[in-house]
């Protein structure tokens, strides 16, 4: 992947540093973070989240022509920590009412986590896609999703060496399914790539980073934040549980939307797979992993609930903005463009 | 409420002896280590997942597998 195009002083500073052009020192960038205006939205800001996403990406696939060892560059890590502190504080602030009410509720933890995901207020992108999205709008959704789903499940893997016993076995069991059960063509990230290709879109990892707004990068950054800090392992697993528990029924709607739009079956296959897979995963995640971590003393209940809430909160942040744009007849992508398929989705035309 | 239907699909495994069936409260049956599940009509539904969720509410649209529909069916208090 190439380094993306900067969106402001922070991302420009980070991208320059990675490209070996020290236009601003990390010290100056740390200062810039400390002096960020109070009114920037830390869950959606384009410049902030592109800068953070680029730094996180060093821990995943990295970038062409960027020195791999910069992953552990102490100055960059210091800058990242300054940004993470602000992002985490904002996530905690926004999550707090939900965390408190779930902590105060009576009953089995797994059931309270299911209840929290079932009752969290927010718009349904899945319902919109099922019933009314145009082909262009569906392609936009795929572009947004490509940022995460081409590395689907990777951020939650960081937790494996940090837990033990039943929760570890359940996490690995869940991830084994996510990673295709030994069959590379069944890797969920690969199935998503097939699905992109079926839409006539580019399946290359990171191909659409320059087109997605800050909120999409922020929802990805939230996963990396939780995954990369052992301190936040309970929250990372709460996030995983909420992700799985808000997947089966929406995926059925997405699959319905795909078929309504007449796209090839390979596009629907990805969503079909998640209807069944995630009905299993949500049980494993909330019962064996999340509740298991708390009862075995490996994580605090509050952290687990925080992670669940962060996932649900970011879904609302993303969903509200996408639907507002679509309902106003605007594109959700930067520059207001719709993704242009590299190839025509042939079967769609035929049907 | 009935957590498990009177005729629960029966897990079938080829050679493994450690098939586990775990009922989830208000949810599906988790079946770990099965190669297939035999439904009420005797039909075999093969699987390659390490653990599968078998519908226990009778409302799934992908029988015998759970598709999350139990969550939209009102739970009894």
Image (tube, coloured by chain):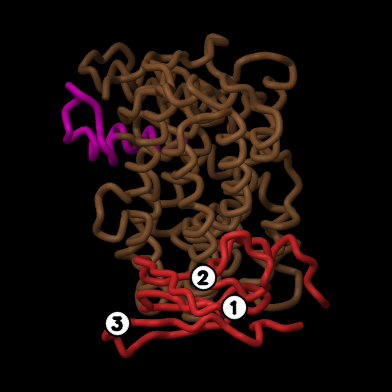
> Where are the magenta residues, as a range?
A58-83
Q: Are the residues under marks 3 and 1 on the same chain?
A: yes
Judge whether A34 appears above or below A130 on screen. above
The chain containing the residue under callout 2 comes to: B
Asked which secondary structure carries label 3, the reply is: loop
Where does the image place residue A60, in percent across and percent down from the top left?
29, 40
Q: Which chain is brown?
A: A
Q: 10 Å neighbourhood of mark 1: few (<14), some, or many (≥20)? A: some
Q: Which residue is mark 2?
A: B53
Q: Which chain is red?
A: B
- Of badges 3 and 2, nearer the viewer stands 3
Image-based side of A128 in relation to A91, left or right = right
Pointers 2 and 1 in contact (CB under 8 A)? yes
Q: 10 Å neighbourhood of mark 2: few (<14), some, or many (≥20)? A: many
Q: CA distance from mark 2 to mark 1?
A: 9 Å
Which quadrant of the rendered structure holds the N terminus of chain A?
top left
Where does the image place residue A341, in percent across and percent down from the top left?
43, 17
Q: Earlier in the sequence, mark 3 or mark 2?
A: 3
Where does the image place residue A288, in percent across and percent down from the top left?
49, 74
Pick out the residue farthest to the bottom: B17
Q: CA distance from mark 3 to mark 2?
A: 19 Å
Which mark is on residue B24? Answer: 1
Q: CA distance from mark 3 to mark 1?
A: 25 Å
> A263 or A157: nearer the eye?
A263
Q: Which residue is mark 3?
A: B14
Q: 10 Å neighbourhood of mark 3: few (<14), some, or many (≥20)? A: few
Q: Is residue A29 magenta?
A: no
Residue occupying the point 70% across, 63% down? B71
Q: Earlier in the sequence, mark 3 or mark 1?
A: 3
Judge whether A249 appears above or below B15 on screen. above
Image-based side of A113 in relation to A229, left or right = right
């Amino acid at each position: 992947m190439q380094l993306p195009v900067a969106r402001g002083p922070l991302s420009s500073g980070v991208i320059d540093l990675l490209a070996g052009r020290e236009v601003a020192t990390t010290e100056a960038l740390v200062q810039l973070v400390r002096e960020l205006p109070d009114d920037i939205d830390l869950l959606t800001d384009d410049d902030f989240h592109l800068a953070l996403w680029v730094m996180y990406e060093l821990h995943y696939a990295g970038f062409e022509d960027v020195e791999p060892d910069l992953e552990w560059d102490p100055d960059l890590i210091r800058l990242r920590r300054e940004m993470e502190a602000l992002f985490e504080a904002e996530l905690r602030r926004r999550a707090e009412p939900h965390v408190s009410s779930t902590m105060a509720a009576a009953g089995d933890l797994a059931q309270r986590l299911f209840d929290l995901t079932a009752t969290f207020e927010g718009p349904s992108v899945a319902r919109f896609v099922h019933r009314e999205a145009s082909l262009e709008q569906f392609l936009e959704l795929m572009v947004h999703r490509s940022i995460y789903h081409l590395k689907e499940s990777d951020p939650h893997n960081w937790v494996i060496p940090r837990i033990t016993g039943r929760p570890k076995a359940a996490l690995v069991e869940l991830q084994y399914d996510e990673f295709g059960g030994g069959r590379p063509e069944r890797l969920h990230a690969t199935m998503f790539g097939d699905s992109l290709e079926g839409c006539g879109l580019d399946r290359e990892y990171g191909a659409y980073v320059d087109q997605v707004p800050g909120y999409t990068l922020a929802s990805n950054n939230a996963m990396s934040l939780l995954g990369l800090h052992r301190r936040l392992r309970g929250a990372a697993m709460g996030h995983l549980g909420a992700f799985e528990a808000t997947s089966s029924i929406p995926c059925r709607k997405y699959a319905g939307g795909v078929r309504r739009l007449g796209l090839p079956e390979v596009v629907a296959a990805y969503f079909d797979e998640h209807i069944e897979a995630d009905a299993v995963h949500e049980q494993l995640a909330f019962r064996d992993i999340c509740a298991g971590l708390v009862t075995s003393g490996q994580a605090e209940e509050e952290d687990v609930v925080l992670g669940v809430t962060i996932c649900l909160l970011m879904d609302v942040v993303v969903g509200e903005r996408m639907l507002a744009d679509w309902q106003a007849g605007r594109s959700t992508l930067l520059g207001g463009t719709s993704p242009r398929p590299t190839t025509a989705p042939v079967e769609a035309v035929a049907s | 409420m009935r957590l498990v239907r009177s005729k629960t699909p029966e897990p079938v495994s080829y050679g493994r002896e450690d098939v586990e069936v775990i009922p989830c409260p208000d949810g599906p049956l988790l079946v770990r280590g099965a190669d297939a599940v035999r439904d009420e009509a005797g039909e075999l539904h093969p699987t390659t997942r390490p653990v599968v969720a078998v519908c226990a509410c009778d409302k799934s649209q992908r029988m015998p597998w759970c598709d999350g529909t139990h969550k939209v069916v009102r739970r009894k208090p």
